[in-house]
Amino acid sequence: MSTNTNNLPPVEALQALANQLFNALPEEAPKEVSFDPYEHPRATAFAKSITGEGVVPGVGVPVDEAWVQSGGPAPFAVSDPFNGIAAPPSATGLGASSSIASYGNTNTALPGAGEGNNYLPPGYEQTKSDQSTLNGGVPASVAGSGASPSYVHQQDNFSIKEPVTSFPDSNIDKPAGSKDIFALPYAGEQAYWSDVESILKLISISDAPSGISPLSPTADVHTPSFYFLQSREQPVQNGQLGGFTSGFDAYKIKRDFPILNEKVNGKSLVWLDNAATTQKPQLVIDRLSYFYRQENSNIHRAAHELAARATDAYEAARKKVQQFLGAKSPNEIIFVRGATEAINLVAQSWGDQYLKAGDEIIVSHLEHHANIVPWKRLADKKGLTLKVIPVDDDGQILLSEYAKLLSSNTKLVAFTQVSNALGTVTPAEQIVAMAHAAGAKVLVDGAQSVSHMPVNVQALDADWFVFSGHKVFGPTGIGVVYGKEALLNETEPWQGGGNMIQDVTFEKIQYHKAPNRFEAGTGNIADAVGLGAAIDYVTQLGMANINAYEHALLEYATYHLTQVPGVRLIGTAAHKASVLSFTLKGYSNDDVGKALNREGIAVRTGHHCAQPILRRMGVETTVRPSLAFYNTCEDVDRLISVLKGLVR
Ligand code: PLP
């Protein structure tokens, strides 16, 4: 039997008492007290504060003296049980990200952001290289943990026909900075929001351009704005990167990404292959691990605790995607494997159902194969015509030519917001508006845009918007189709099976509405949750900040790259994001890639799954460095110095 230092009843008796108390509390409260320190930390901390026992070696838990003296149970909220407790595990990376916490004022550093609070769950081995970036293994905003509100909802109202899928998540719904008494475990960490907000106020960034007025096809000339490439002049002035003066510290951010500490060929890794895939912050790695250790279950179809935790976590991720994209409802967010599967879904469901011989689909010349092949296959199958919006020699969409392609036969326009091969940012709002004016639906491929710029699908007014999780710092194997809710519900499912049906007989099948309608079978639950964590991460950095920093870095890289003798930059649009495709005279692209790899620098060489646009630019392949917010001028300098070494 356990003992305690306050001459109180045995721990087991207190535990039973506390469980009774919690069960009488509103449903958001933790429903059980466990003395496993990793299971329900908030409730455990509270219980241990009563008994005076230490929770975790080296972690102080305040004993509530007043309670002890009064001899009776204090209301749950008399003291914040996390007060004085070291930061929970994955403080680095999300809430207490070293990079975020240390912007500006180090006094605002978040609990646990410092070293020494190594609060590791059992079985989690902290490696030496982890130590600078990790404070442990449990993510901060763990939706769907022990205090699952949805579990309670499901228990009371569980319906096989209409399983609850939009669960309340206090971490998501509450306004930034507010503190719940009955928050989920670690919700106290959310206090970092106020720090981040006050720091971000110091950063002055102008707004993105509002776009060119709709239905004005003559507006091929882009209005200058802060994220247009300004000039080919030296972009570092007075020590500032392209005049970019905020406290955005890519070096600190880099520390949130363990893989960026890797050595390749004895050199520290420079990851410039971000258009192919992005690296993952510790927060995302921790979130996946936490899911498999404490939440793993199939979702929606069981009344047990782990099913509720997994369902909560999955549906919370859906809601995060909804907010990230500015969608109206989580019902508009369908989880798929990635952008490729997303486009195939639309082609094989809506396209197959609504398009008929003679109808026309328009794509742009910039498209990735993922936004060509599914449409070409559908066109061949159904007798549709595929038309292509041309680009100019810089790789910019020719809106005036696009206007000529549109007619009442146009049923769909599918185009990319950012070209993966050239980096061109397309005038998306105008392309959408022009398509709608012609009565066509529009699919926007956001695979290369969501990690570089703020996206709002309602402002964009796209009918569908797709992206891949792995290109926005989330896991592979997870992606998203956003679709307008009414449109999704008017569309036949593309795959059949479990999870997407309301009722099945051998005579008749009734489908669920979106999103379940399009999520047949067991989906990639854990990676959806990981994607939610990645969205938390970029949201906290701020997409506008990311965009401004990357733009300054792109200007820096463009200037220096074009100073290297023999470099031909492929893709010179005024409005670009992240990508610097080039060839180097006298060298094959493979040779350049290998020379860079010898110095630990990762770039992509090849056709980048965008053969039509490379051929339009007169090449079969290019070398393609691509930037993310964790890249620095030093990374670019290392790339340039290898190229200069080659041509010397
Ligand atoms: N669309 C664009 C513009 C891309 O760059 C990519 C991948 O590079 C895709 C679609 C396909 O993405 P995924 O391979 O993740 O499905």
Image: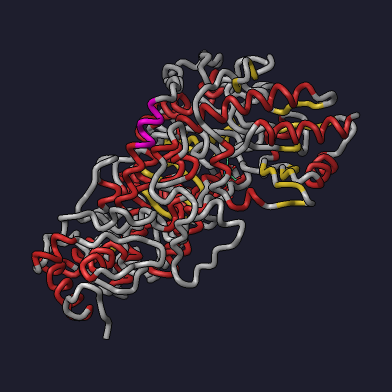
Q: How many marks?
A: 0
Q: Residue furthest bottom?
A: 1
Is 384 left, or right, of 239 in this rendering?
left
Q: Nearer the viewer, residue 187 or 288?
A: 187
Q: Quadrant of the N terminus?
A: bottom left
The reply to whether the magenta stretch includes residue 196 is yes
Residue depicted at x 62% and y 52%: 259
How far across and down, in percent of the image, does residue 580 sit?
Answer: 68, 31
Q: Nearer the viewer, residue 204 or 577?
A: 204
Residue depicted at x 17% and y 71%: 18
Q: Which residues are magenta?
A: 195-201
Q: Can residue 481 be seen at all in this image of the molecule?
A: no
Ligand 1 shown in quarter: top right
Is 556 left, or right, of 249 in this rendering?
right
How far across and down, in percent of the image, does residue 140 sit?
Answer: 38, 54
Residue depicted at x 57% and y 26%: 551
Q: Quadrant of the C terminus?
A: top right
The reply to whether the magenta stretch includes residue 647 is no
Q: Main secondary structure of the magenta part?
A: helix
Is 35 left, or right, of 344 in this rendering?
left
How far across and down, in percent of the image, does residue 2 sit?
Answer: 27, 82
